[in-house]
Amino acid sequence: MDEPVWLAESDTIADMVNHPAFAGFGAHLIPRPQDAQSDLPLREVGRLMPWHSHVQPPVVLQAVNRMIADSSAGKTVFYDFYEEQQKRARTGLFYFRGKPGAPFALIFPGGGFAYVGSLHEGFPLAEVLSRKGYNALVLQYRTGGPTVAYEDMAAALSWIFRHADELEVSTQSYSLWGGSAGARMAADLGSYGAAAFGGEYIPRPATVVMGYTGHERYTKNDSPTFAVVSQGDPIASPRVMERRIAALNAAGVDTEFHLYRHAGHGFGVGTGTDAEGWMELAVRFWEKHMTNEVL
């Protein structure tokens, strides 16, 4: 194997998209397809995600270079989950491996259903989880509204269950993660199941982890739910999240809620904000609800 060619902050968006490690799917990395050949340097990658805050180029690059390392080592880092005749534009799953046989997390980045912020709100989360030994998959879904996005999330989860042996993941005690629009996806998938959105019957997740969303729907059979938001969020009202968590508690669903002060909207893993470290708390909550899983 050739030595990996790492990306740096001085490299451009086009350099990343056209990197040999991402041959055939590099355009899926970026929020919008029109940015594929941008000469914007990666140090300014946050400009591609206007509804996200505190985008940290070193954090983005750590996750992207992790995929380059895995690809250079012969590991598959991107999967199509639709059959050839069913293929949808700009859909797929990015895979960050943990320990073989460990539970998986399926992550839905946000972007208001107008773009998919995987670079900030997907890959860095997956990289953290994989370092902890868990298998993490980040969904690239179609934009344009929740209908097509929900079809893709249901199809992706169904595909993971069908291909669990190939992926070397446990389907026990899996979790769903999402931020903003992606949190709506995670919550609704946990509430109603993949079959409600065109997928197969899938057991409920062990945990739903949701960040900064105005989502209000829930059921009395929802999975244990972990939620984070920041005061002053200009898009997602903390009060709405608090009300939903209170309603879940009243229905007997175990929850954990964290309100931060200075993290804004779309803070990803929280680096550089007072939300930094929230993923440690979320993982512990997930682990509390696992069934007979040992890493």
Image: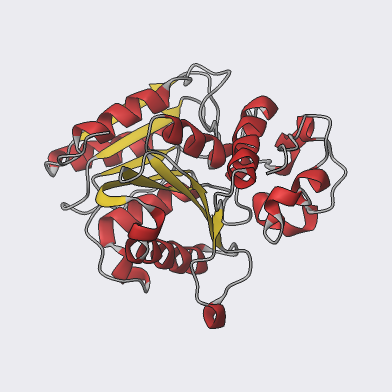
Compared with residue 146, is residue 209 higher up or lower down, i.e. above or below?
above
Give the image location of residue 237, x and y in percent: 44, 36
Residue at 65% from the left image edge and 36% from the top image edge: 65
Which image quarter holds the N terminus? top right
Quadrant the C terminus occupies: top left
Q: Is residue 56 left or right of residue 243?
A: right
Q: Residue farthest to the bottom? A: 85
96 w.r.t. 269: above or below: below
Relative horizontal placement of residue 109, taking residue 228 as reference (left or right): right
> Is 92 situated left or right of 195 in this image?
right
Q: Quadrant of residue 189?
A: bottom left
Q: Residue at x 31, y 34 (%)?
A: 242
Whether residue 141 is visible, yes or no, is no
Question: Farthest left residue?
Answer: 252
Taking 238 as reference, is 51 above or below it? below
The x, y position of residue 227, in whole percent, is 35, 34
- Percent position (x, y) of residue 178? 44, 44
- Residue 278 shows up from this direction: yes
**Nearer to me, 237 or 126:** 126
Q: Position of residue 134 (x, y in %)?
A: 37, 38
